[in-house]
Image (cartoon, rainbow, N blue to C red):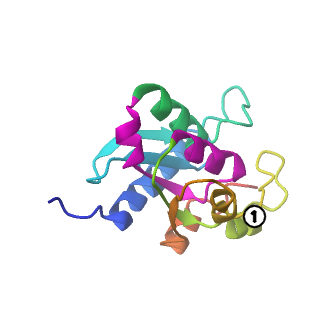
Amino acid sequence: MSAAPDHEALLRLCFEEAAAARAKGMHPFAALLADADGEVLMIQHNAYMPDHDATGHAERVLMTRASTSLAPEILRGATMYTSAEPCAMCAGAAYWVGIRRVVYGLSESRLKVITGNHPENPTLDLPCRTVFAAGQRPVEVIGPLLEDEAAAVHIGAWG
């Protein structure tokens, strides 16, 4: 039997990737998908730039990639790790793809405080747990976790 995934280590990898996205001039968000053993299957940065795709959230793009390239049995055991709590759109994408767990760093409510009413991130403060609770199958949620570390990459990024 394999060891349980190291949620904190995988989240910290997301924070590093979010910082890398910011360094490239993109919004400071990242997500990754890990299998049931905690092996990273794919990583995704926010994809708002260069085309100003308002639906280019890292989590939504990651879920699209996962659903078109991974078998359902892999997805059923997978966990999405994300630097910030999935918004309603991203939580919906995770639900439809069929993953079993979401682990996130920064809460939507704290993100809203940091970003304010920024036109490129009009944060929808709707907990992902609320979105998942409306579904017909359970999605485990762990977070916020390491929230101060998750918030650090956003400080000064939203003008």
x and y percentages locating residue 92 in the rendered image: 65, 46
The residue segment tinted magenta is: 70-97
Q: Which residue is mark 1?
A: 112
In front: 153, or 64? Answer: 64
Q: Secondary structure at mark 1?
A: helix
x and y percentages locating residue 130 in the rendered image: 69, 64
Left or right: where does residue 68 sit relative to residue 112?
Answer: left
Q: Quadrant of residue 110?
A: bottom right
Is 74 included in the stretch rendered in magenta? yes
Examine the rendered structure and indicate whether residue 99 appears above or below residue 63: below
Examine the rendered structure and indicate whether residue 112 appears above or below residue 22: below
What's the residue type where badge 1 is placed?
Lys
Left or right: where does residue 153 sit relative to residue 70?
Answer: right
x and y percentages locating residue 2 in the rendered image: 17, 59
In front: 61, or 77? Answer: 77
Residue at 62% x, 51% y is: 91
